[in-house]
Amino acid sequence: MARRESAAAGPGSRALIVDLIRSAGPISRAELVTATGLTQPTISIIVRRLIDDGVVRETGATVSTGGKPRILLVINSHAAYGVGIHVAADAFTCVVTDTRGGTVGRQLVARPAGEKPDAAVDRLAALYRDVTGGLGLLPQSVAGLAVVGPGPVDVAQGRFLALPGLEDWAGIDLGAALAEQLGVPVLIDSDAAAATVGEFWGRQVSRERTFGCLYMNSAIGSGVVLDGALHRGAGSNAGKIGHVAVVRDGRPCHCGNRGCLEEYAAPRVLAEQARSTPGLAARLDIRPEDPAARAFDILARAAIYGDVQAHALLDASARLLAEGAVTLANLWDLDTLVLAGPGFAVAGSIYVTQIRHHLAERAYSRQIHAVQVDLSSNPRDAAAIGGAALVLQGAVAPGHGPKVAAPE
Amino acid sequence: MARRESAAAGPGSRALIVDLIRSAGPISRAELVTATGLTQPTISIIVRRLIDDGVVRETGATVSTGGKPRILLVINSHAAYGVGIHVAADAFTCVVTDTRGGTVGRQLVARPAGEKPDAAVDRLAALYRDVTGGLGLLPQSVAGLAVVGPGPVDVAQGRFLALPGLEDWAGIDLGAALAEQLGVPVLIDSDAAAATVGEFWGRQVSRERTFGCLYMNSAIGSGVVLDGALHRGAGSNAGKIGHVAVVRDGRPCHCGNRGCLEEYAAPRVLAEQARSTPGLAARLDIRPEDPAARAFDILARAAIYGDVQAHALLDASARLLAEGAVTLANLWDLDTLVLAGPGFAVAGSIYVTQIRHHLAERAYSRQIHAVQVDLSSNPRDAAAIGGAALVLQGAVAPGHGPKVAAPE
């Protein structure tokens, strides 16, 4: 039975066909008719446009089913390139991928503390030029740029509303500013949303799955893909698992809620806990100047190598995230959950184990089906790669991605 | 921007068109083309079939837009009737609605404690015959029967897996058994899911909304409608907000989780609390033989009329549900939340107030958009009415509803 019962036609038809060719290709036009329920003429028209646009190509191979041999279609992986830049507390990560989600370029630049927003915008533009220029990409082959980061985003307006260290960006139409400088479409989105789309797209996940992604960096977020499409909600801020209360009437959170998961389990919180645990920071050689993310990775490595105090801190965080995972599973009825984000780069194994254990014991639907829990193959770059995927979805499948600010 | 970005065509096209005529009608074929993105020929073919099936009719009215006058389409409200039976701990409620969701018949029968499953099945069949017979409905005008209740359901198999007092039903293919006795299609679903669809359908909610429903009876559940379709998840058990932990390492719940919302805030729990509060049950004339639901309603009435002890108990429950509502809002990014179910029939005002207050102060997206919170216009029958709506969706829009067990 379909997980969602209705199905809408329309601009999404092209997106649907692209996604089917991506996930089920090589596939014939006749199979697309069956899979979509669209009419033969409709399929022919859309496929013809996709071929003309260079998004899809015919393999040359055919399948014979007694009647007329059927030509098979695949995604043209070099049709376009997507660029994603992930804005973290201490660095910008830029990634370029092809239409199949393969990474063709990557660059990371540090973010000077207290940098002014305008300087940061110029730095983003320079990073984009460096990476695309270094790869010798033709401007017309770049589908666009996605800038993704934590905190509430106004996707429609292309703004970050409260980016740590760049709160002033709330006043800037970042998408339009960058589109004008770079001459490519630019979209702004949440790192968790981007990572979710990137993991779904890159793993060739079937649209039948109820696919969730738990994203951990300085903040904790999540996303869910339903029928092959990211669920955004009324204001594009769905999946805020980091702002679900895990401690009744607990610490007040900047989000307005109290006892938020993020305030007890996020890497930055564990870094503070490590520093305030007598002797621990010194023993693990966590320096005062180390950013929280680095302190957390040192702590995680120590926990994996058996440091009892470090393990106790990680374990407490992992249990909280595992409870969050049960909440996601029980509300979305997930069959797949992927862990992505820099927070899982070193500590991933500890979290995966705890989350699998919790879901197997506590998930509401466990007697009906299991929830498969996997670690991202590239937790650190997942959001940037996902940003590139969002751009490509929008480019190869208009109507499939969020609105983008087009250059003047 | 669409909240969900892809859109699938196919069997759902008919469902989509029915839903558009229902929510946006009177509407012309040309407007349907614009709204769906389906081709003119496709729309014409589907609309023709809907008219032939008696689901849709032409109003006779036309709109002139300079060119050829356009004929307007509306749902034919008497095309078919849906029957929904809600299975509660102490009673069966049967409701009959027309295709516009208007209730044309209702009957409630008590459920004798400890009734054997087979006898309960016969009782359901008898109730169906009483109500439809009493209304003089022609068998062919009845689209089918939905039996809805709490606990995990296997929608595909047509089974309740753990219905309070009827656990043995887990072994029975209830859908097939009733379909054979009654000669109509029968579907089995969760009361929360049914209520969600019923509230969405009956309120003529636009498919643009991210529509949530919080359902409270002996248990607490929820549902969400995205792009006009109920989100079911991998195993049709999404929306289990009653089994989200609100107390860390709290009481173990039958679901496998600990500290579940339901174990602290559900009416049956408050009934126990009332009975264990010295003097309260006696003062409010809550008798030992009163079922939990009745005891809860007495308690709620007392709270509304200012009984301090009663109000303290209700207020604590309302705060917990309000936290649950924030969780739903933060994970789904809801713009609408309706409260339905017998638990809100008397106590609704107390819960609505607390939930509105909490969402206004704590919802993650509150600076971007508000969450509208409404009380169902018929909290007690919401699940039964929703069951009828599920049947009608399946009937008037094949592919739109869950699988049904067809009669032999």
Image (spheres, coloured by chain):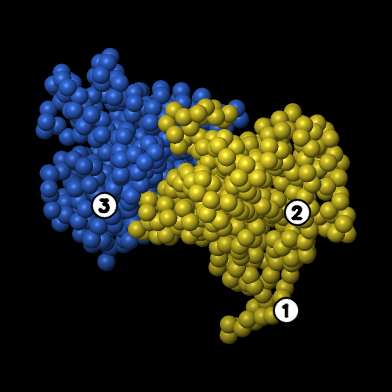
Chain colours: A yellow, B blue
The mark found on residue A95 in the picture is 2
Task: Look at label 1 and name its amino acid.
Answer: Gly
Q: Measure the C-alpha gap from mark 3 to mark 1.
A: 54 Å
Residue at image point 63% right, 81% down: A63
Disc 1: host chain? A
Residue at image point 87% right, 57% down: A134
Task: Look at label 3 and name its amino acid.
Answer: Ala
Task: Look at label 2 and name its amino acid.
Answer: Val
Q: Is residue B67 above or below residue A37?
A: above
Q: Is residue B368 above or below residue A147?
A: above
Extreme residue in the bottom direction: A66
The quadrant holding residue A137 is: bottom right
Question: At which x and y percent is residue B146?
Answer: 31, 50
Question: At which x and y percent is residue B125?
Answer: 19, 52
Q: Position of B138 compared to A333: left or right?
A: left
Helix or strand or loop: what does disc 1 sit on? strand
Residue A181 visible in image: yes
Quadrant where the C terminus of chain B lies? bottom left
Which marked residue is nearer to the observer: mark 3 or mark 2?
2
Q: Which residue is mark 1?
A: A60
Q: Measure the C-alpha gap from mark 3 to mark 2.
A: 49 Å
Disc 3: host chain? B
Q: Which residue is mark 3?
A: B162
Label 1: how many residues lie within 10 Å, few (<14), some (14-19) or many (20+)?
few
